[in-house]
Amino acid sequence: MGLQLSYVCVSHVGHRRRTNQDNFICDGQFMRQDEKKSEVFHAGTVGLDRAVLFGVFDGMGGGEYGEEASLLAAGRAARTPMDQPPRKVLEEICIQANREICSFAADHQLGTCGTTAAMLLFAQGQVTLCNLGDSRIFQIANRQIRQISQDHVTPAPFGHKPPLLQYLGIPPEEIHLCPTYGEWPCRAGDRYLICSDGLTDMLSLEEIGKMVQEPPGKAVQKLLEQALERGGKDNITMILLKVCKPERGLWKSAKRFLRRKRNVTGN
């Protein structure tokens, strides 16, 4: 019998931002402009007999421009065919999304308009990673958490946010786009967390590592609650994934836990 993948995806505007500049790709689903709310979530289980893509995009450039950049990236990810080798698929997403965002910035005479990208493609018995920027991907295996993405940032003075060295939206004539790639076997029991810095700026790796050991729906609930309690200074988007055998793949509690958040966050 093949493996299944259970997932919970949540995106929250946070307490300080007026708009949500994050977006995601979640088995073909992403946030369109007319679907943006203070909180959006998806949960489900998919079979790994086909290629399936998950990712988080954190837009930058201020207001609607960062929001448009992450939307362009998510939309491109949703439209890209999955019938090529995994790395080739991810490369194509980055190239085409970068081109579309650069065109948008040029059309609107923008100085900065871009988005991070942190993606996992499950296909051919492997997990293939691709990331640009500082949205992070963690692997949780044998109750240990480790970051498997690379932060593309430059050093900054203490207390200042490190500027990004790589992101989608860089004109090709200025800087060569160099995503980080990685590949691992797809193993039952492993979990993966993809998230924007609205989560990792609020919580330590140790805190995240403890919470993701909970049942997945409850883990996402706790992570979001804690990030909001710490101030919710930025948009918060995360996708928690669990590779599992079919008989263990039904994630019955996920939506129930996510609905309970409304009572805590006031949404």
Image: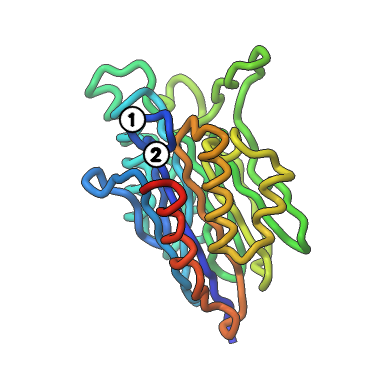
User: Where does the image place residue 174, in percent across and percent down from the top left?
Assistant: 46, 19
Q: Classify residue 70 by image quadrant.
A: top left
User: Where does the image place residue 146, in percent across and percent down from the top left?
Assistant: 73, 49
**Foreground pick, 138 / 94:** 138
Using a 10 Å C-alpha cutoff, classify the residue at mark 1 as few (fewer than 14 neighbours), some (14 to 19) or many (20 or more): few
- Describe residue 161's horizontal placement relative to residue 116 as left or right: right
Secondary structure of the residue carrying tag 1 is loop
Q: Which residue is mark 1?
A: 18
Secondary structure of the residue carrying tag 2 is loop
Looking at the rendered structure, which numbered label has been put on residue 116?
A: none
User: Where does the image place residue 121, in percent across and percent down from the top left?
Assistant: 52, 58
- Describe residue 260's horizontal placement relative to residue 150 as left or right: left
The residue under the point 57% across, 52% down is: 222
The quadrant in which the N terminus is found is bottom right
Q: Is residue 15 above or below residue 131?
A: above
**Foreground pick, 253 / 4:** 253
> How far is mark 1 from mark 2, CA to CA?
7 Å
